[in-house]
Image (spheres, rainbow, N blue to C red):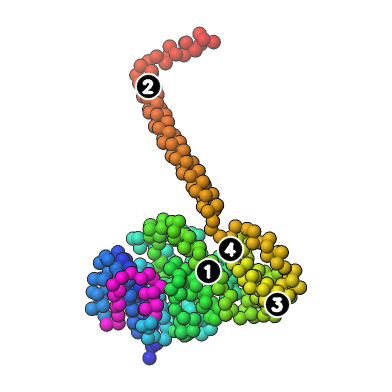
Amino acid sequence: MDPLISIVMVNYNKEMYIEEAIKSVLEQTYTNWELIIVDDGSTDDSVNIIRKYQGMDDRIKAIFRKENSQICVVTNIGFGQVKGEFVARIDSDDVWLPQKLEKQLAYLEVHPEGGLCFTKLDIIDENSKNINDELPDLYKAYNSRRNQEEWIRHFFFCGNTLIQSSLLMKREVLDSIGNFNVAYMQGHDFDFFTRAIRKYQFIFLEEPLTWYRRTGNQNSGSNETNDRRFFNENMNIRYHYFDDMEDELFIRCFHGDFVNPESVSHEEILCEQAFLLCKCIQGEVDNPVLGLTKLERLLNDPRTGDILQNKFGYCPKDYYKQSVQKLFYTEEVQKKINILSYDLNVQMHINKSLEAKNAELYAECEELKQQVQGMLNSRSWRVTKPLRKVSKMVGK
C-alpha cells in the first residue's frame, strides 16, 4: 500500500491565496495524503473557504483557533495530528505543481540516505506570475545546493535559504529532532533546519515543483521591529548551534577555521567553538558577544582554562580586550542612532527638494524647447532666413 503523506498547512488571513493552495493539494497525482489545516484565528473569509473544501474531501482535516497564536504554535498543533510515514509543509499562499508529492516520494525511495527532500522552486507574485527574473538573487539563493558539511557552514555564517513549502521529509525526522521552537517567531524554520542537518542528509529534486509566493507586503515588510527580532532570533540560534553536535562532525565542517589546527579533544573542541562564535556573522568579529559568553565559562573551568592558555595562548587579559567592545544596547548607542536617523531624514528632505527643483527646471526647459521649435517652424522664421544670412555676412 502507498505510504500516507501528512500535509500541514497553517493559515492566518490569507483569503486571497488559500483556495489556490488547497486546490494544488487536491490536484496532486499522488492521492494517499491527509491535509491538516490549522487556522490561526483568521478574521477574513479564510475560515469559510477552509470549511467549503473540508466538506468536499474527507482527507482534509481543519482546526480553527479562536485567537491568533503565531506560526510556531499552530504548526506544532498540526505536527501533533500527523499520522503519515512522511510529512510535508505548505504555506497557505504557496502552490504545488500536480506531480510534486509523487516525484518527491519516488526520489526519496531511490535515495534512502536522504531524510529531507526539497524541490527546485519558482517565485511568483500576488497574481501567480513568475518573477524569477525580477528577483534573480533570491531565486539563486532559494535554489542553491550544498552537501551536509556545506549546509552546516552556510547556516552558521549566512543563515537560511531553504523554503518549507518545497519540503517532504520522513516522519522519523520530526520524531527525532522535535517540533518548531516556539521561542522563534521569524527564525523557526532556520532553527528547525539547523537541528535537522546535524542528523540527516538533505537531498534535492531538481524540478521546479513548488511556487513560492513573494507579495508586495513581503518585499517591503522589513521594519525596525521585525529586523531587530529577526537578528536576535538568528543570534540565539547560533548561540545554541553546537549543542548536541558531535565533535567529529564539527571537525569535518569547521577544521579550516580552527585557531589551533591540532585541536581534537572534547575540551579543545569546546574552545574552538567559543572562538568560532566570536565571528559567527559572515566570519566577522565586530560583535563577539556569543563567543565571550562561552569563553567566560571555559576560563572559569580549571581544565579548559589551562587548555585555553597552553594550547591557544588565550588568557583573561585577552578576554578583557574583547569585552571592552560595545556588545549590548546602551543609551549611548541609542543617542548615536537618533543622531544618524535625524541626519538621514534631513538628507532625504534635501534630496526630495532637489528632485522637485530638477523636475521643475526640466519642465521649464521642455517648454522653452517647444517654443523655440515653434518659432523655427513658423512662416516668419522661414521668410526672414535670407535676411539673417545677410546680417551674418555684414557682421563679419
Q: Residue furthest right?
A: 310
Residue drawn at point x = 48 percent, y = 44 percent: 342
Q: Which residues are magenta?
A: 58-79
Q: Within the image, what quadrant is residue 289 found in?
A: bottom right
Rendering coords of residue 104 (x, y %):
44, 79
Mark 4–mark 1 Cα distance, whole angstroms, equals: 12 Å
- Upstream in the sequence, badge 3 or badge 2? 3
Query: Are dots 4 and 1 in contact, CB under 8 Å?
Result: no
Of the two numbered discs 2 and 1 in the rendering, the one whose residue sits closer to the viewer: 1
Instruction: Give coordinates of residue 377: x percent, y percent.
Output: 37, 23
Nearest-to-viewer mark from 4 and 2 = 4
Compare marks 3 and 4 and give the one earlier in the sequence. Answer: 4
Q: With respect to residue 40, does 177 lie above or below? A: below
- The numbered mark at residue 236 is 1
Q: Is residue 202 above or below residue 233?
A: below
- Mark 1 against mark 3, which lies toward the viewer? 3
Q: In the depicted view, which residue is nearer to us: 17 or 27?
A: 17
Identity of the amino acid at label 3? Answer: Pro
Report which residue position mark 3 lands on.
302
Residue 11: in sight, yes or no? Answer: no
What secondary structure is marked by label 1?
A: helix
Residue assigned mark 4: 281
Q: Position of residue 83 (x, y in %)?
A: 37, 86
Q: Residue extending furthest bottom?
A: 1
Q: Secondary structure at mark 4?
A: loop
